[in-house]
């Protein structure tokens, strides 16, 4: 089962993972807003939303940046999907998913594809300096067992 | 990164020798400064390696960060309907700092296109679908930014925004084909 979470996505709005049940979820953990590779990765996923939507999948980005930092980053890049703030206690959700880097205090670049029943069906850990693209995510969405 | 999916086919815009042993594919965004930088490198390669090289361009517009990328792709594809894809492709890259709809239209005029037909083609599903399919094929092929090059279906991971790095990759592929 995918670990549950309840995190801020805007300064006054939270997302609870229970609300996401019933549709596939793509959780994309990344090290930091504004870093070059993360910026490219989120920009790419922003453009790939139309392909994710064919699978009725919800994309969510997560990093340890604050909700205000996320808001500025999201506005700057014109992102059309939520960024969650794994800020307090720092990295708690990243730790639950086994993708927190204790040395530099950031999430690792890890992707999870979670099915409608909240079961992790696919995951991938990319080196911090490599943008993993979206082909693996689409392949995983295609293989989801509960896809109607 | 994955292999090129789908392989080069009749829907693609081709340049150079179609019977060449080396096929270079670029996924590009007309408003991307890195693609603008790569543009003369590809032109030079096509001149210097005209017999050995076959070049294909696929659209990978990143609309949210490049507001003129999609409309530029539409204009290039619509020009392609009148046999002027490459002319428009080159003009757009060469004038990347001036992209807007009026300027793009002036490029179409300058190319002597039938502007009524051009307007129809610009709005056609066919053109939109071509761009969408190009983009999806890029995602499926593991493209994570632009430009991304593929040589005979495999990603070029050594391109470092120099002509030499692209030439070296082509040279290596040529040597592999000879052995």
Image (cartoon, coloured by chain):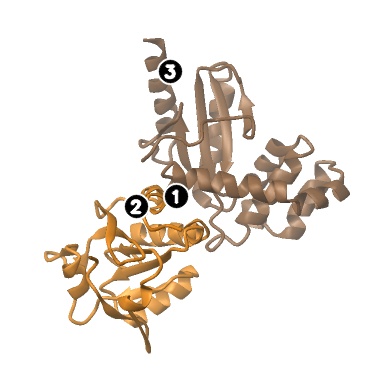
Chain colours: A orange, B brown
Left or right of B94? Residue B145 is left
Residue nearest the observer in this picture, B127 or A120: A120
Q: Secondary structure at mark 1?
A: loop
Precedes in sequence: disc 1 or disc 3? 1
Q: Which mark is residue B145?
A: 1
Cα separation, mark 1 vs mark 3, equals 26 Å
Q: Residue at x 56, y 52 (%)?
A: B61
Q: Residue at x 59, y 50 (%)?
A: B132
Quadrant where the image shows the N terminus of chain A: bottom left
Q: Position of residue B70 (x, y in %)?
A: 63, 55
Q: Position of residue A148 (x, y in %)?
A: 46, 58
Cα separation, mark 3 vs mark 2, equals 29 Å
Cα separation, mark 1 vs mark 2, equals 9 Å
Provide the residue designation for mark 2.
A131
Provide the residue designation for mark 3.
B174
Image height of B7 relative to A123, above or below = above
């Amino acid at each position: 089962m995918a670990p549950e979470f309840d995190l801020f996505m805007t300064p006054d709005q939270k997302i609870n993972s229970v609300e996401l049940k019933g549709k596939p979820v793509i959780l994309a953990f990344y090290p930091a807003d504004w870093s070059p590779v993360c910026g490219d990765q989120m920009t790419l996923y922003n453009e790939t939303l139309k392909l994710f939507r064919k699978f009725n999948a919800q994309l969510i980005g997560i990093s340890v940046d604050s909700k205000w930092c996320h808001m500025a980053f999201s506005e700057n890049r014109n992102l059309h999907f939520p960024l969650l703030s794994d800020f307090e206690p720092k990295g708690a959700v990243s730790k639950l998913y086994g993708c927190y880097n204790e040395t530099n205090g950031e999430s690792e670049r890890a992707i999870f594809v979670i099915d409608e029943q909240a079961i992790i069906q696919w995951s991938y850990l990319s080196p911090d300096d490599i943008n993993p693209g979206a082909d693996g995510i689409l392949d995983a969405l295609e293989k989801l067992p509960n896809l109607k | 990164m994955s292999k090129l999916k789908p392989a080069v086919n009749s829907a693609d815009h081709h340049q150079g020798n179609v019977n060449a042993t080396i096929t270079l594919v670029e996924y590009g965004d007309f408003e991307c400064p890195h693609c603008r930088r790569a543009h003369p490198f590809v032109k030079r390669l096509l001149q210097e390696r005209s017999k050995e090289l076959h070049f294909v361009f696929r659209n990978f517009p990143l609309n949210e960060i490049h507001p003129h990328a999609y409309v530029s792709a539409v204009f290039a594809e619509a020009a392609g309907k009148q046999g002027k894809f490459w002319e428009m492709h080159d003009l757009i890259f060469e004038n990347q700092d001036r992209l807007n709809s009026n300027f793009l239209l002036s490029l179409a005029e300058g190319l002597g296109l039938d502007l009524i037909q051009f307007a129809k083609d610009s709005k056609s599903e066919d053109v939109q679908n071509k761009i969408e399919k190009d983009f999806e094929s890029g995602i499926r092929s593991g493209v994570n930014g632009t430009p991304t090059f593929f040589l005979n279906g495999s990603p070029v991971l050594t391109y470092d925004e120099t002509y030499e790095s692209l030439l070296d990759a082509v040279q290596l592929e040529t040597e592999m084909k000879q052995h």
